[in-house]
Image (cartoon, grey):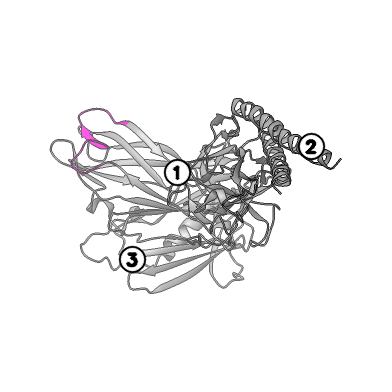
Amino acid sequence: MSILGAMFSGVSGLNAQSQALGAIADNITNQNTIGYKATEVRFQTLVTSQASLNNYSPGGVQQRPFAAVDVQGLFASSTNATDLGISGDGFFVVNSASTHDGSLGFSFTRAGAFSADKSGYLQNTAGVYLQGYKTNSLGQTVDADNNSFNPDPTVFTNLETIRLNNIGGTADATESLTFGANLNAEAAVGATSNTTIQVYDSLGVAHNLQLVWTKAENNNWDLGIQPPSGAATSVLLASSGSVYASSGRLDITTTPSDGETITVTFTNSTGGTNALTFEFNESSAAATTSGGIAVNFNSGNGASGAVTALVAALNASDVAATLRASTATQRFNQNTTTTTRIDITQTAVAGTGTDANALDITIDASNLGSASQSGAGSATIRDLDLNPSSTAGVTFDGSGIPSAFNVDDITLDLNNGAADLAIDFDFGTVGQADGLVQFASAYNPTFIDTDGAAFGQFSGVTINTAGLVTALFENGDIRPIFQIPVATFANPNGLGINTGNTYDQTDYSGLYFLRTAGTGGAGTVQSSVLENSTVDIAKEFTTMITTQRAYSASAKIISTADEMFDQLVRIKR
């Protein structure tokens, strides 16, 4: 029994060392495989229960492969922004298909050599696709309906393959304007200084915003901003949210056709409305088809003549015209430089308290195709009779330092289909010389800082340590698009190993948890790096030598046992 036992023990040794050699072979051939974890074959005794204290029953050896999945490989730099590594614990979530139902095909990997396939999906060299949560412009994770949510860390719901070729371009509307300047303390009352600043709407169209500073009295300056070309209204708001100043414009770009109409609605401070329709009419004797107010004009005078006639009709029909002090305070005026433009300006009304004559004026030029505002729908010029000089836009103390700001932001109603433009102003800090100041020196803008950008094509991505994928655009704009989760396990060495350097959850690994990189024990995401194989080639060759010797020794056991059997057979002879 002991001779046969020794022979079987030697056989188990041959088998175990053969398995060890196979692991060494895999390690050596995968020494350049990204994210590969070296496997070693560990041995344990195979014991036969001893029937007697005086006899020994050999058992042999068993092999147990062990892949140190939790061992971190060295990082190597890369020029590809979508080459990713995880510094610390965790795995990328991948799927075998680019599109899926959120329940099948998921596995885990640290092989982060991702690049876009022909459809723009991020895929690594093993052919699996990187998963992430879609985000909104604030970086919040959103579901398929773009509703923000907090991901459940134990399910794959709302994970989708990260795709880069369907991002397109973007334009960024201006939302803030920071401005600093010196307003000349020696300027005469009524003197003006102006600066033109370029801003962008939501479609990426540039608009020239002209800031006009008017000295109201010593240490007090008012701000006026006329609607730029392409806008219908300009409403300046005070810090309280009330209207500080308001104005509008109407541009007649071509000679109106006979019968074209424009509707103007006057709304007083108590909510009463008076809607009037004005119809262009080349024949003063003909009745208007709309039943509105006739605007009699001669088409031979072109658009400018039509504007002259419309201004006269508007001012004559102004519901508060009888309260004006003079024609100098009329609300509708033909621009002296551009005679095809009507300026709708505020009128200073004497008196204090609530102005019963204050008006909102709504212009609806949708039926006036000759006006550039025809596509803007209805635009409202608010609280038209406010007196801007009653409360200065900015007040300075005797040291030239601002003591109060009364202009907070501006809204512009645009004609081109873009969203209304709302810009927050920052003119400095009360009591500090960090924006507007007033000293005895010429007007001098010291700094202008705005956000917003024209249209720009998608140019690439950047990925931060938290796994947030941000799209970069040619106009300098940036936009978060995906959040890459990191999966962690209680026992990563218990994961099941698959072809393609991917892993599956098993009973030995414990449940996965999808975490934000850098939180809850998850490692951080590193961009433009790759995690090298953990194979130590010198160690593998050394182990190969010892494995070869052990295999030879096991073979020697079998040959020795064979010789002993031979001797036993010869006894019978």
Q: Which numbered marker is on residue 567?
A: 2
Q: Is residue 304 visible to us here?
A: no
Residue 356 vertical position relative to residue 138 in the rendered view, above or below:
below
Q: How many residues crowd mark 3 within 10 Å: few (<14), some (14–19), many (20+)?
A: few
In the rendered image, residue 112, in percent from the top left (x then y), is placed at: 60, 40
Q: Which numbered marker is on residue 336?
A: 1
Q: Amino acid at mark 1?
A: Thr
Q: Quadrant of residue 289?
A: bottom right
Q: Secondary structure at mark 3?
A: helix
Compared across the picture, whether 322 is left or right of 430 comes to right
Foreground pick, 483 / 228: 483
Query: Which stretch appears magenta?
Result: 429-445
Compared across the picture, whether 216 is left or right of 122 comes to left
Q: Amino acid at mark 3?
A: Thr
Q: Secondary structure at mark 1?
A: loop
> Does residue 438 belong to the magenta stretch?
yes
Q: Secondary structure at mark 2?
A: helix
N-terminal of the two: label 3 or label 1?
Answer: 3
Q: Which numbered marker is on residue 214?
A: none
Between marks 3 and 1, how big is the CA–CA gap?
25 Å
N-terminal of the two: label 3 or label 2?
Answer: 3
Q: Quadrant of residue 258?
A: bottom right
Q: How many residues crowd mark 1 within 10 Å: few (<14), some (14–19), many (20+)?
A: few
Which residue is under mark 3? 322
